[in-house]
Amino acid sequence: MAKKAKVAKKTAAKPSKAPATKGAKPKLLSGGNPQIAKAYGDAPVQAYIAAMPDWKSDIGARIDAIITRTVPRVRKAVKWNSPMYGMSDNVWFMSFHVFTRYVKVAFFRGAALRPVPPGTSKQKDVRYLDIHEDDEIDEAQIAAWVKQASKLPGEKM
């Protein structure tokens, strides 16, 4: 029996249905929070900060700089559309998130920090610091919290 030769069928390339993302600004979610794909490292965190709207981007850059200066070996990622900071992969001690009128800084073991950050949570260990547009930022206090938080057991996420 003779074998039939398979003939490759030529098809025209279909245009991609996915929107072009190179150079495109990330979509802003509820409250102006940037939608950044889950990824590890500094680059996605910087992309998140660059996409934060208005004055919030400056706040994000300041918080990131405080963390990086205070904990030079910090691990970074973007997960759940928020920058995450930790001492090892998938174990995080803090994060921040954009809301309409403020940036919410979360300390996952904040109840153990001294002094305790002012914002309470439904979770007993979590404490928040909300930063509004015209708030004075006490960088020394934030750095002290970051230093303390980096030495506590983080949250596995």
Image (cartoon, rainbow, N blue to C red):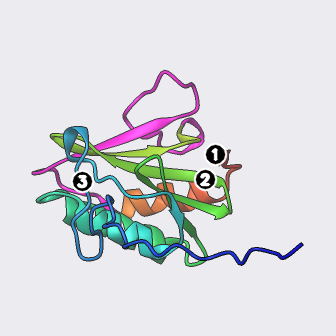
| CB-based contact (under 8 Å), mark 1 and mark 3 | no
Which contiguous range is marked in magenta?
111-139
Question: In what quadrant of the picture does the C terminus appear?
Answer: top right
Q: Is residue 113 left or right of residue 47?
A: right
Which of the two discs, 1 and 3, sits closer to the camera? 3
Residue type, mark 1 in image: Met
Q: Nearer the viewer, residue 22 or 129?
A: 22
What residue is at 55 percent from the left and 78 percent from the top?
Answer: 72
| CB-based contact (under 8 Å), mark 1 and mark 2 | yes
Q: Give the CA separation, mark 1 to mark 2.
A: 7 Å
Q: Is residue 71 left or right of residue 118?
A: right
Image spot of residue 83 (x, y percent): 44, 57
Q: Earlier in the sequence, mark 1 or mark 2?
A: 2
Give me the disc on residue 157: 1
Residue 35 vs 7, above or below: the answer is above
Which of the two discs, 2 and 3, sits closer to the camera? 3
Q: Main secondary structure of the magenta part?
A: loop
Question: In what quadrant of the picture does the N terminus appear?
Answer: bottom right
Q: Earlier in the sequence, mark 2 or mark 3?
A: 3
Q: Is 138 contained in the magenta span?
A: yes
User: Badge 1, how many Cα within 10 Å: few under 14, some, many 20+?
Assistant: few
Q: Earlier in the sequence, mark 1 or mark 3?
A: 3
Label 2: which residue? 92
